[in-house]
Image (cartoon, grey):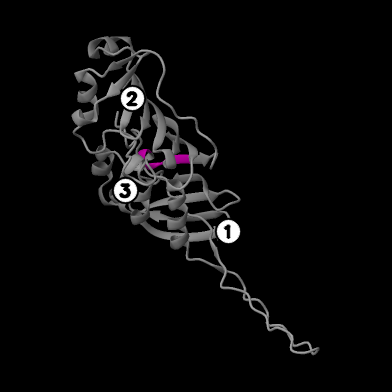
């Protein structure tokens, strides 16, 4: 199961509405004679792609919670960029094997819980009820961990901006467009096997976005039904600005065994 990619295939795209006020002006009265006022300019909607960038930047400026759903994978988590803290849980099922993984990240410190079922847990020397501390110097794969403390948004959703091809405004809270999934990184990065299978078809995949009352993404979807079901992804965001209470796991914490690093670096 991949980590930074949450094991999900596909990407959620988000766009937001932004109203750029060009300013209001009126001519003041001279003496006692009133002069006709100049009408205020009509508010101008910012270009859809520009408002998309604004929306993504908010994920690096405020805390939030999120959920991720894909055919065989589901995930949820919370992030607090100011504290460089995030917590992510992932559940996946494929070929009759179920797997669960949780990560808590506080700055440069990371802890994980893993559960691949009794047989595989025993083989890997993993106790699914206990947290393990990760020595990041032993993590050699660039995207092995779901949280990147060097990224402003911690979860690398910002990579989506460069992948957007087109964005259209449907109404004040709904957007649609297309995205090149072959260039997306971070938690929304498509699975390499799926990309190889669909080839160039992944370079233009439809997406939709629903915004909340403050112009922030609340639900983001890609639709891969016409290409490959694995390219469909649904991400929701909520609880913006709320205290997320992300802290070091409690109880006995062991050092992660070598098998954990084999999984992360695999």
Look at the image and give the residue range highlighted in magenta: 230-235
Q: Marks 2/1: CA distance?
A: 42 Å
Question: Does residue 214 show up magenta in the picture?
Answer: no
Q: Which of the two labelled residues, at mark 2 and mark 3, occupies the earlier sequence position?
A: 2
Q: Which residue is mark 1?
A: 171
Q: Which of the two labelled residues, at mark 2 and mark 1, occupies the earlier sequence position?
A: 2
* Among the 4 quarters of the image, the one containing residue 93: top left
Q: Is residue 33 left or right of residue 182?
A: right
* Among the 4 quarters of the image, the one containing residue 248: top left
Q: Which residue is mark 3?
A: 184
* Among the 4 quarters of the image, the one containing residue 149: top left
Screen quadrant of the C terminus: top left
Q: What is the x, y in percent for residue 237?
A: 50, 41
Under circle 2, the secondary element is strand
Q: Mark 2 against mark 1, which lies toward the viewer?
A: 2
Under circle 1, the secondary element is strand
Q: Residue at x 25, y 12 (%)?
A: 125
Q: Which of the two labelled residues, at mark 1 and mark 3, occupies the earlier sequence position?
A: 1
Q: What is the x, y in percent for residue 258?
A: 19, 19
Q: Which residue is mark 2?
A: 111
Query: Which circle marks residue 134 in the picture?
Result: none
Q: Name, please, the residue furthest toward the right.
A: 32
Q: Residue at x 43, y 27 (%)?
A: 247
Q: Residue at x 33, y 45 (%)?
A: 151
Under circle 3, the secondary element is loop
Tag 2–tag 3 contact (CB < 8 Å): no
Q: What is the x, y in percent for residue 120?
A: 27, 13
Q: Residues within 10 Å of mark 1 (few under 14, many from 20)?
A: few
């Amino acid at each position: 199961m991949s980590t930074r990619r949450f094991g999900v295939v596909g990407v959620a795209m988000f766009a937001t509405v932004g109203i750029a006020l060009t300013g209001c002006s009126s001519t003041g009265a001279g003496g006692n004679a009133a002069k006709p006022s100049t009408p205020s300019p009509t508010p101008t909607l910012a270009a859809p792609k520009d408002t998309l960038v604004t929306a993504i930047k908010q994920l690096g400026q405020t805390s939030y919670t999120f959920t991720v759903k894909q055919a065989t994978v589901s995930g949820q988590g919370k992030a607090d960029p100011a504290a460089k803290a995030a917590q992510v849980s992932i559940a996946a099922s494929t070929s009759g094997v179920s797997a669960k993984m949780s990560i808590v990240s506080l700055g440069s410190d990371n802890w994980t819980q893993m559960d691949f079922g009794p047989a595989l847990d025993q083989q890997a020397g993993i106790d699914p009820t206990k947290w393990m501390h990760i020595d990041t110097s032993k993590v050699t794969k660039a995207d092995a961990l779901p949280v990147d403390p060097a990224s402003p948004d911690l979860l690398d959703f910002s990579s989506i901006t460069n992948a957007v091809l087109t964005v259209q405004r449907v109404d004040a809270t709904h957007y649609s467009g297309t995205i090149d999934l072959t260039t997306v990184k971070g938690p929304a990065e498509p699975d390499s096997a799926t990309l190889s299978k669909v080839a160039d078809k992944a370079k233009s995949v439809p997406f939709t976005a629903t915004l909340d009352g403050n112009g922030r993404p609340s639900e983001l979807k890609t639709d891969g039904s016409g290409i490959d079901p694995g390219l469909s992804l649904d991400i929701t965001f909520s609880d913006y600005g709320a205290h997320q209470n992300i802290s070091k796991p409690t109880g006995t914490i062991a050092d992660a065994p070598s098998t954990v690093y084999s999984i992360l670096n695999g």
